[in-house]
Image (cartoon, rainbow, N blue to C red):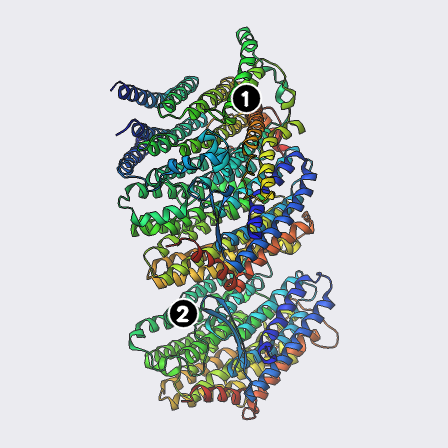
Amino acid sequence: MKRILAVTLPLLASMALVLLLGASLWSIAGSQTPVNLPELLAGKMNESGVNHPVTAVLLNFRSYDTLLEIAVLVIAGITGISMARTASLEDPELRTSDSLLYALQRWFIPLMLLLAGYLLWAGADRPGGAFQAGAVLAGCGVLMRLGGIPLGFLRPGLLLRVGLGLGFAVFLLVAVLSAMAGEAFLAYPPGMTKPLIITIETVLTFSIAMVLLALFVSAPVNDAGAPGEDDS
Amino acid sequence: MTPSLLYAFAGAGLCGIGMFGFIQLRHLLRKLLAFNLIGSGTFLVLVGLAQHGQGPDAVPQALVLTGIVVSIAATALAIVLIRRYFHLSGHTSLEADDSDSGQGGAE
Amino acid sequence: MLEWFLDLLLVTALLTTAIATLSSRDLFRAVVVFIAFGLLMAVAWVRLQAPDIALAETAIGAGLTGVLLLDAVSHFRRGGTVAASGRSDAAGGREQ
Amino acid sequence: MITAWLMAGLLFTPLAWAVLCLLLDFSRGRLVSCLGITVQVLVSLGLWVAVAREGGFLYGLGGWEAPLGIELRVDGLAVTFILLTAIVAGACGLHASVYLAPDNAWYRYFWPLFWFLWAGLNGVWLGGDLFNLYVGLELLSLSAVGLVALGGGINALRASLRYLLAALLGSMAYLLGVALMYGQFGTLSIAGIASLLPETQALVGPGMAMALMLSGLALKTALFPLHGWLPPAHGIAKSPVSALLSALVVKASFYIAARLWLEFGHELGSTAVAQLIGGLGGAAVIWGSWLACRQSQLKQVVAYSSVAQIGYLFLLFPLTFAVSDTASLQAQQGMTLQVVSHALAKAAMFLAAGNLILATGSHQVAGLAGVSHFLPFSLFSFGLAGVSLMGMPPSGGFAAKWMLLQASLASGQWWWIVVLVAGSLLSAAYVFRIYQASFVAKTGVDDFYHPPGSLEVIPLLLALMSLGLALVAEPLLSVMALSLETGGAP
Amino acid sequence: MSLSALLPPITLMTSLLAAVLIFATPEHRSGLRTTINLTAALIKLLLVAIMVWGVFQGVDYHLTFTMLPGVAFTLKADALSVMFAGLSAILWLLTTVYAVGYLEDSPNRSRFFGFFSLCVASTMGIALAGNLFTFLLFYEMLTLATYPLVVHRGTVEALRAGRTYILYTLTGGAVLLVAIAWLHGLVGDLPFRQGGHFQQAASDLETPLTLIFVLLIAGLGVKAAIFPLHGWLPQAMVAPAPVSALLHAVAVVKAGAFGIVRVVYDIYGIESVAALGLLEPLAWLAAFTILYGSVRALSQADLKRRLAFSTISQVSYIILGISLFGPIGTAGGLVHLLHQGIMKITLFFCAGNYAETLGIHRVDELDGAGRRMPGTSIAFTIGAFGMIGTPPLAGFITKWTIASGAIAANMHWAIAVLLLSSILNAAYFLPVVQRLWFREAVNDWPHERFWGRLETSAWLFWPPLITALMTIMVGVLASMPFSPLSWAELIAAREYLP
């Protein structure tokens, strides 16, 4: 009885959720939005400094979101490496001896680096940007890591932490400096918009890649006791 | 009815499926998968609903990009925690072992 | 009409893979299906005229999450012995 | 202009401290953080004074006004909570700088996480944009999870995983609500939506959105019966972290829920919903206190007490819905006082509990025997904080209870009086249980560890602030009330 | 802000400051602690004396500021408050002296005296409160400050007694809070005013006002130990003797009784209580409690428990007196507030002396103690005869005045109650006195200690004698100006002014 209930109750709840969601979607779809944001956005695009609207929203109109989002990434990275008690790079289990993978790497890594560069460069005008480029870059690192190439900079140390914080720090710096130049916070001085956005995107790319890679690297575990309050 | 709206409905479905899985499944990794399904569903609702009337809208797309990055951060962090938890306790679910610790699991 | 058909197909595939992900008995399979789900999502984003998200979903969603999850699954698979030793470690750690 | 600078200082400098601390080890991070705490407290105070004098304002970040940009809402309530955050987080930070052992390598990550947490809190208090609040919430949750897990063993990991999953589910529900809101109105600004709501005919979508957002936030605030994740997480974390989480982090999600209710509740709420939420809050008060009475571990008692105290906050919902303006105002004032006094008292209590655990070497309530004889000072701060939790005069808890009583009477919803009275008696039961344990005579010599004076002073100061809150409640409330005039409140 | 506004808070602050200083005093600096204690007590006595004179001259001591929206924190000194304040100031001084001797060489004295001072500060606050809200503030503070005193010994019985005490008083406090909040929501902030506020109460308020009155009396009745809310008082006997003395004579039960006086006279007004038909039930309740306490006291073998039930009975004299409509009855009730304090504190001091010097706790162990400890026993005898109501001691004045009040109010049954209870008083006190003086000591005392020349420590010896002397003086000199009786008559006259 209890088992059946344990299945049916969540099932009913989920179905109710879907039905209610569906109903409200249908209701919302039937009415016009009172604010037409795309139109507003299109009107301001020429002030944004970039040609791609998504990039404009991310790095100009709603750049505070992006700043906090990078902070979230950095937090995840910090927590991740705080869990890795020692440099886990020497863990032999991680290395793949797969020859296919090894061969793939030779071809893939340069290609992926190229792709990352392209995505970053394209971000201003076309789809693409720091996140995608960062992810590709991180993918590169993952491949190298699986191939057993020691990535020394990922050892929990100063270098790693600099890498984690760099993109975020530059973003923050630009935000504050532009404010000092008399603009509103997180606003760019006129004329400087595009170069600044590109700069931010570049460092962000590296930082994002670094965080993701750090999380990947710190996921494997190793032994370390944790004497502390909870170990009564 | 536009294709966008269809995807929004699909998103609602995904939310429901994910929700069910999230509550029902015990394995932490599976819970995480379910959470990602809810996330995808939510993103589909966000973009699909916003775009059903007036075509592409950059704002929700940007929001979804932010959301994806946030959820990958959370997912990656969760994986790290789950793996370490598994390493220390040998368990893959939260409920399995309130007995061996005598604390922390009281509800 | 064809587009409608494609969209419907895609949506069905999305929901099916989602259910399959959660109902799969084997964890490894579940993760593989989830990666497939991520790729389908990318296609859906293209259909929604959101190429940025499609790129991100491929790279981050399907790619990186997939690798992380697969890595974790392989860890769990090796887990039997590790966990046993991990247990004693934990006990040792507590005594310190 | 200076106000805008101060405000930006609050949003961005914590992030800068975080990055700086990330590059340093624990001891140097401690130095930087002490400097940072001083700066933040001063800036918060400055902003509070400025807003108290000149009134609140809306601020578009990046020079972009809503709906295109992100709007911040700087009003009396927000700056009061910012000041509260500065005081409580500053105290917890200073306590942690002595409490945490610098030789543990992973504690170096404490400071960055601490500062990110602070930044997230400030972001939430000021946020006026639905999606931005989502990102702020995630920032908070992840750094809180990181802090709980920091250097922990199995139990800490289990607690933090439970916390993480609950927080993620909560944020997703919230985000789903945001998606529906955006679909309906095409804007994310809270003020914008509030001004559009009265003209909206079809309320199914926004209603559902509201329901989703509120339930997500309720999960994150640990409203009964969604509170299961809170006691393990708050009980197991290091004491300064527990203090931060209980005092501030849960309040953030509640704050958003309350703001949404006050802005949208008139159109999207109903008596049934309001009473339901209030009922859950009442159940939390009773159930949480009852469980707190039954815990054998000191910090679990304090953690369950948080579940109960959070319950009081949710009485705001029925007491502001469809009642007279007087009652509504009284309820809001009561809620604000409860947030402030609980934050101060609970932080003091967790810090003092940490000291007691440090001193006795035991997590058990029963381990406190003899404490009143050998460690009167540590017990004293705990006791004073307890006075506020019980709602005894002249504490802030009492003032809050008084205002809520008045609101219940003025709105004719007398059944909440039962909850308030029963809750305060039950909370007296668990607080006095601890007093009693500490008054048990213990013969023999003093084998307790005596914590350094700096650890003792911080909780004492917080407890005294919470205790004396009622005496300065009137001027404080007059600044908080600024929120109701400047914003687009109903 | 003039000096007259500052005098009440300064008076309050002396004991509050003393508490803080004592908490900070290291355990072994007993000399310093005693100095702080006595200095504070003397200063306070002086300040209260100034206020008594001032109130007599018609000076208005009044301080008020808004604390919460619509609620003021008010301190003021009127005739009634300085009467209570004077009582606690005098008795605090004596109890402090006594407690210093009683707790010599025992542990945790800083904690004890700290909370002791806090307790008296709360009592002062109760005396000087200018409205119900302020009263509630200090009333609850008193609860908290007395708990550590009750559980001071840390034994199982002490902790159990503490739990009972807290259970009763906190519940009472919660009821009181609801009542005050309700009243506040109904009619706003009410300062205490002679004659009360509801002389011509609107008829639609009758039902809520009646309910609120019942709640108020229930909340205050817990501390005043009115039947059936008295259960905590006999249990609290495990506390050290000075604490019992304080609990019974000055602070806790008196706070309850004082609160009832305030509610009946200065909030509702005696006329409106009578008009609501609440005065008579209150008198009946008091009468029942008087008899109940006396009957229970008869069968108590433990000396302090016997005194405790006697307190339950005696405090209700106050309630009975004030619920007799008319200035004479009121004066009788009010004067008993003082008289009972003085007499009961004498008895408790003596009981403490027997326990501390000879190790005696039970009535049947007292045989022949009069010869071993004549000073203490004389004091005890005076106190006991005072309680019984022998002329010309304090108790007689009370009973006489109340009886006159009963005749004036046409409530003759009250006289029967008084007579009956006097007989019962005699029945439970006279055997004790008889044992003291007219029986031979059977064998060794349970636990005897010696202090050189005096029969006991000088700190313990003098306080009961002084209070015994006061018991005689207030009786003999009852008609002098500034005697308790004339002061009570002054207050009563003001309450009944048109």
Name the side, left or right, on which E326 lies relative to D60.
Answer: left
Observer-nearest of D31 and A230: D31
Percent of width and height locating residue E408: 39, 91
Observer-nearest of E368 and C74: C74
Question: Which residue type carries mark 1?
Answer: Ala
Name the side, left or right, on which E381 lies relative to C31.
Answer: right
For label 1, the crowd category at 10 Å Cα-Cα, with few meaning under 14, some 14 to 19 and many 20 or more, is many
Pointer 2 and pointer 1 on the same chain: no
For label 2, the crowd category at 10 Å Cα-Cα, with few meaning under 14, some 14 to 19 and many 20 or more, is some
Question: E412 above or below E21?
Answer: below
**Residue A148's image quarter?**
top right
Q: Chain of mark 2?
A: E
Can residue D306 be seen in this snapshot?
yes
Percent of width and height locating residue D22: 63, 35
**Residue D403's image quarter?**
bottom left
Observer-nearest of D303 and E106: D303
- Rendered residue at 52%/48% (across/down): D247
Q: Chain of mark 1?
A: A
Alpha carbon distance from label 2 to label 1? 66 Å
Question: B54 above or below E211?
Answer: above
Question: Which residue type carries mark 2?
Answer: His
Residue beneath label 2, please?
E184
**Quarter of the image containing the C terminus of chain D?**
bottom left
Residue beneath label 1, please?
A138
- Rendered residue at 60%/84% (across/down): E470
